[in-house]
Amino acid sequence: MAYDYDLIVIGAGSGGVRASRISAGHGARVAVIEESRPGGTCVIRGCVPKKLLMYGSAFSAEAEDAAGFGWQVSVDGHDWPALIDAKNRELDRLEGIYRSLLTNAGVDLVEGRGVITGPHEVAVGGRRLTAEQILVATGGWPQIPDVPGLAEHGITSNEALDLAVRPDRVLIYGGGYIAVEFASIFNGFGIDTHLVYRADMPLRGFDDDIRRESATALAGRGITLHPGCTLTGVVADGAGRRSVTLSDGTELVVDQVMAATGRRPNTSGLGLEAAGLAVGPRGEIPVDASSRSEVASIYAVGDVTDRVALTPVAIAEGHALADSLFGGRPRRVTHANIPSAVFTQPPIASVGLAEDEARSQYGEVTVFTSRFNAMKNTISGRSEKTFMKLIVETASDRVVGAHMLGPEAGEIMQGIGVAIIAGATKADFDATIGIHPTAAEEFVTMRTPRA
Ligand code: NDP
């Protein structure tokens, strides 16, 4: 049977766009369907706008630090709408780039909501398009827990990136990546910020030392932490404020309540059942190591698969799939040793295993830590420590985990990630000469294991 396309991709986010472009480059006839704006979560309502707001929020601390170096700086307010406008202009520019990337690659961009109507067919608007293969790359969406008033009176990261008015007081619910990053953003803009999370420390899944150091640093910046707490109710007062009750009895009145309580794969209403495809417990599309679902003609990459919800992972999966299907180069993405950063202030970055994971995987591990005052803080007077940690499998001397909290952690960890992927040993780290004076050199000068 002749299909309209070799590949139909649903979702023009990071994974879908990469898979479309590369497939077209390999000579495939490709359509990508997008119901919102090309660019997807990362470009339109995630990584990019988040980082722009993060840059904006960091200037207040820079101004404080400048005083120690003799600058007479005063921060006279902040024009919030100007920031949101500038951010939106940049997103428009990036959306344009994504559109032309697709057009220039010869991909048909079909705007509308795609619904799968069979193993080889997708309906969009009034049209039905057919393809030999279908790729679902629809990403994820914020999930809001069932707390009375939270869904009605709260916002998620989608709206938090686009607030028309700067709030004076904000409560963020959750302790994951999004929660702590937005807490830092709001705090940097001088907004009274409360972070409420049910665990004893934020950032479950990260190394416990990093979680502890992060909580200390966030509190040190002036964020009020409410560990071990849940929200029990949110009520709007009619004048734009929200009264929030916590499980420990605390009551707070804030301008915005943000739910940052995780994201779910975006599969509802996608018609997967029409193709005979059952989703997993979180709504995810189960796939094998080649990103193929249980229906042979349907593939999925990125957050919708609930593997590792990070943009570069979705891009790698989309690229590998395109090479495998149309490039004559079948390959898979390894999901181990993926570096990531949390763009709090100060930021966190990490690659490899947390200490408890390393112990259960390898038994005996040797741990090196360093906690120090960054040079800039000596004169700025900021009492905030940088923390670094290396975890080494004792038997092989291989470095199996590296973790950092401190300025430029994300920039530093990228290179450490290469070393860990290459199987570097602690002896290799020791044989590397440091770049002086930097914080990064500490990673190659840690000599004494923690007792
Ligand atoms: P996370 O899974 O990181 O965090 C979710 C948070 O919500 C956790 O603290 C969790 O608590 C809490 N939570 C979940 N359900 C409930 C509930 N019912 N009641 C109370 N608390 C709840 O999700 P995010 O939404 O922050 O981020 C989604 C993913 O996006 C991340 O995992 C990451 O992969 C990616 N991301 C990456 C970024 C980066 O690379 N810098 C930035 C932003 C997102 P508990 O831990 O107790 O379960």
Image (cartoon, grey):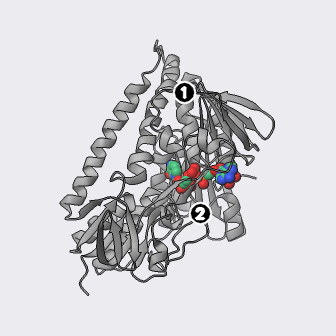
Which of 176/388 is in front? 176
Question: Residue 321's x, y, as percent?
Answer: 37, 73
Labels 1 and 2: the sequence-earlier one: 1
**Vertical side of 366 occupied by 231: above or below:** above
Alpha-carbon span between mark 1 and mark 2: 42 Å
Residue at 55 percent across and 23 percent down: it is 380
Residue at 39 percent across and 62 percent down: it is 15
Residue at 46 percent across and 53 percent down: it is 414
Residue picked out by circle 2: 400
Question: Residue 263's x, y, as percent?
Answer: 56, 55
**Vertical side of 254 occupied by 33: above or below:** below
| Label placed on residue 101 | none
Residue picked out by circle 1: 167
Question: Residue 78's x, y, as percent?
Answer: 45, 21
Q: Amino acid at mark 2?
A: Val
- Mark 1 vs mark 2: give the one in front: 1
Q: Quadrant of residue 295?
A: bottom left
Residue at disc 1, CB closer than 8 Å to ligand 1? no
Find out whether the residues at labels 1 and 2 contact each other: C-beta distance under 8 Å.
Answer: no
Residue at 64 percent across and 56 percent down: it is 205
Residue 49 visible in the picture:
yes
How crowded is the residue under tag 2: few (<14 C-alpha within 10 Å), some, or many (20+)? many
Furthest residue in direction right, as rendered: 249
Question: Residue 21's x, y, as percent?
Answer: 27, 65
Q: Amino acid at mark 1?
A: Pro
Residue at disc 2, CB closer than 8 Å to ligand 1? no
Q: In this figure, what is the number of numbered marks?
A: 2
- Along the horizontal axis of the image, is 351 left or right of 104? right
Q: Quadrant of the N terminus?
A: bottom left
